[in-house]
Amino acid sequence: MIYKLLLSTTLAAVSMFAASSIYDFTLNSITGQPVPLSQYKGKVVLVVNVASKCGFTPQYKGLEAVYKKYESKGLVILGFPANNFGSQEPGTNSEIQSFCSRTYSVTFPMFSKISVLGSDQAPLYQYLTGKKTDPTFAGDIGWNFTKFLVDRNGKIVARFDSAVEPESSEVTKAIETALQQ
């Protein structure tokens, strides 16, 4: 058991340091299918750790509105359910998918539940929060609905804390700037 944990931790660390952009990662969709993030090359990507039982959960509505508004211009939003903060995402992937669809009519890509903080942090989030990746936006995730904006070349260009609404002028201005480049 210890060997498996050590091996998975080592592989995650190697994966993180070998990555040069988010396009180097493959994660499972909410239905369990592998999704290479390289399929989003050339798009502006908003990566968000989400939760169904959080005070910020209503941001799904804003995320969906932003997705609908900018999707045709090259924006994609990627939702990553995580149960790291206050156990606010306790459901299974199927339950999460049903909740998002039924309650907020989410159509943007959703992924299988992952960890965004701690010793079992997913390699993608090790990359997004790592000082070697981009010291400007490094640091642990503080809560659900933290947003990372990635430009068309896979470079992190902005990070927004949970309280920053998806439809805020701050987020939409950053998205519009990234879409124009």
Image (cartoon, grey):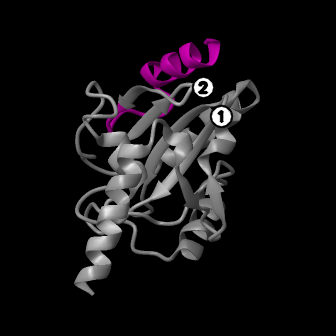
Classify 177 as above or below 56.
above
| Residue 48 falls left or right of residue 108 | left
Q: Is mark 1 on a helix, strand or loop?
A: loop
Where are the magenta residues, as a range?
160-181
Q: How far apart are marks 2 and 1 (CA)?
A: 6 Å
Mark sitting on residue 41: 1
Classify 173 as above or below 139.
above
| Residue 6 falls left or right of residue 112 | left
Quadrant including the N terminus? bottom left
User: Would you say residue 56 is visible in this rendering?
Assistant: no
Between residue 130 and residue 142, name the one nearer to us: 130
Q: Which amino acid does label 1 sit on?
A: Lys
Tell me the crowding category of disc 1: few under 14, some 14 to 19, or many 20 or more residues within 10 angstroms, Cα based. Answer: some
Mark 2–mark 1 contact, CB under 8 Å? yes
Between residue 32 and residue 50, name the one nearer to us: 32
Q: Is residue 169 magenta?
A: yes
| Percent coordinates x, y for residue 131 in the rendering | 25, 35
Which residue in the structure is indicated by mark 2?
Answer: 152
Q: Is residue 56 magenta?
A: no
Residue at 23 percent across and 39 percent down: it is 139
User: Would you say residue 119 is visible in this rendering?
Assistant: yes
Q: Is mark 2 on a helix, strand or loop?
A: loop
Residue at 43 percent across and 34 percent down: it is 165
Quadrant including the C terminus? top right
Q: Residue furthest right?
A: 72
| Residue 83 falls left or right of residue 64 | left
Between residue 29 and residue 147, name the one nearer to us: 29
| Percent coordinates x, y for residue 129 in the rendering | 30, 41
Between residue 138 and residue 95, name the one nearer to us: 138
